[in-house]
Image (cartoon, rainbow, N blue to C red):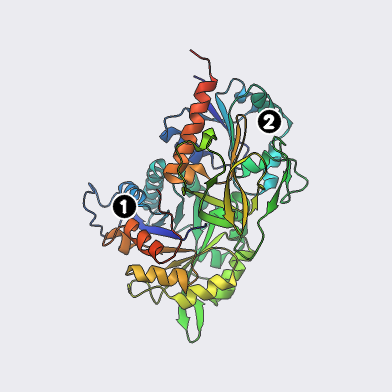
Amino acid sequence: MLTKRLIACLDVRSGRVVKGVNFTGLRDAGDPAELAARYNRDGIDELVVLDISATLEGRRATLETIAAVSRTLFIPLTVGGGIRSIDDARAVVDAGADKIAINSAALADPPLITQLAQLYGSQAVVVSIDARRRGDRFEVLSRGATAHGCADAIAWAREAESRGAGEILLTSIDSDGTRAGFDCDLTAAVSAAVNIPVIASGGAGEPAHFAEVFGRGRADAALAASVFHYAERSVGDLKHFLAARGIPMRLNW
Amino acid sequence: MPSIQIVDYGAGNLASVLKAFAAVGADARIATAPNALDGAGAVVVPGVGHFAATGTLGDAWRASIRAAIAVRTPLLGICLGMQWLMSGSDEAPDTAGLGVFSGRCTRLSGSLKVPHVGWNTIDARTDSCALLDGIGAGAAAYFTHTYAVPVIAEATATTTYGQTFAAVIASDRVFGAQFHPEKSGSAGLRLLANFARLARTSSSPC
């Protein structure tokens, strides 16, 4: 049976994890490779590295980090953040990424989705959508200039799929950072609208939130950062919690 | 000791496969030309993407891969590489597979999302498949595919996603895995270690 996936996100700047981490037993909490190995031992299903470097030097350092992580991690690795071109994508794939996440570049230049899918296959192309509630609709939030008129999150997810995206990483801006739960309405609406997996992001605070988003939210995977980083519960405990509630999880790792 | 040769035909995540073999202590290298397979300890045909991408495995590659199989060199096709071992695929009807196994790959159908992406359980049909040695019941592997190999007689493990399809196929020393062992955690590494061990036993007895 296909299991629901738990995905840990590492925000990395200049090759270092930026959010605070207080795992016991970590020699260097800011070392992405060490943290990745810890997650892997704990049973995480996938890892996302989000590069938030502002400088070219920072991005180069992050590429070295990706290479280090991928040498010891044998689960899927997605890299996102600042990928604007085929060349940017090639750099992260060559460094060891299995999937590329694009967000504002896809909005500004939708054919990029197709170009990447043709080069690496759709399974390697994740279109990341930041969405927020606006009345009874969900609108796409773009950080950069957008040449694209598609402001509706559901329509944009559909278009991304038709252009070759293999997965949608959907972040609720309203829920992000609140730790009050995922936006299950948003997630369910997008998941029902597309035929590719949807990864829910934003709002994870406790185990019940994951059960909700896999159930009512119809998410195929759920992504979190701080809940995992602070190790309030291990990934393994969370998986057993969810499995006990009838949600299929990978329990042998 | 002859090394494991990973066929580079432009459609594989070669680096990931290489790193995974390194992690299990196997000597694997990238084969960029067909003659690199001469005397290989084992051959791996990786692959991600569209079946048409296997069109770059032209006559010279096909001949060298067939020659390797003829002298019982262990061979492992991964994902698209496994599908290529079949007669062909509905994904690209004009592109011929190698035809080591009879049958065609068909599109996953039904009401579920396609592609099939994520960790799914692999159910062994036999306890004698060398590739699956030590991989326990309930083990999950990472899949990402739209087309699949039907449950042929040579299927040693199956997976169910809407329909049941071949997860692992084996005929003598030729194997295929629909999932990505290089991305399947400890179970995947175990499979690659099992394959690497076959490579060793196929080299000279001393």
Q: On the image, which quarter does residue B101 sit in?
A: top right
Which of the labelled discs sits on residue B61, or is there none? 2
Q: On the image, which quarter does residue B176 sit in?
A: top right
Looking at this view, is A111 or A221 the one in front? A221
Indicate the amino acid at tag 2: Trp
Number of marks in the image? 2
Q: Residue at the spot x=53%, y=76% of the render?
A: A189
User: Whole-Å distance between the Cαs marked 1 and 2?
Assistant: 43 Å
Q: Which residue is mark 1?
A: A16
From the top left corner, tell me how far across and down residue A69 is, in percent.
38, 45
Q: Residue at the spot x=65%, y=46% of the render?
A: B151
From the top left corner, tell me how far across and down residue A140 is, in percent.
50, 74
From the top left corner, tell me how far across and down residue A12 is, in percent.
35, 55
Q: Residue at the spot x=50%, y=50% of the render?
A: B142
* Crowd rating for badge 1 (residues with CA inside 10 Å; few <14, some 14–19, many 20+): many
Asked if the residue under mark 2 is in contact with the one under mark 1, i.e. CB atoms within 8 Å, the reply is: no
Indicate the amino acid at tag 1: Arg
Looking at this view, is A182 or A208 the one in front? A208
Residue B44 can be seen in this image? yes
| Residue at the farthest top position | B206
* Crowd rating for badge 2 (residues with CA inside 10 Å; few <14, some 14–19, many 20+): some
Nearer to us: label 1 or label 2: 2
Looking at this view, is A143 or B187 the one in front? B187
From the top left corner, tell me how far across and down residue B14 is, in percent.
53, 39
Please, what secondary structure does the residue beneath circle 2 have?
helix
Q: On the image, which quarter does residue B109 sit in?
A: bottom right
The vertical placement of A156 against B64, above or below, is below
Q: Mark 2, chain letter?
A: B
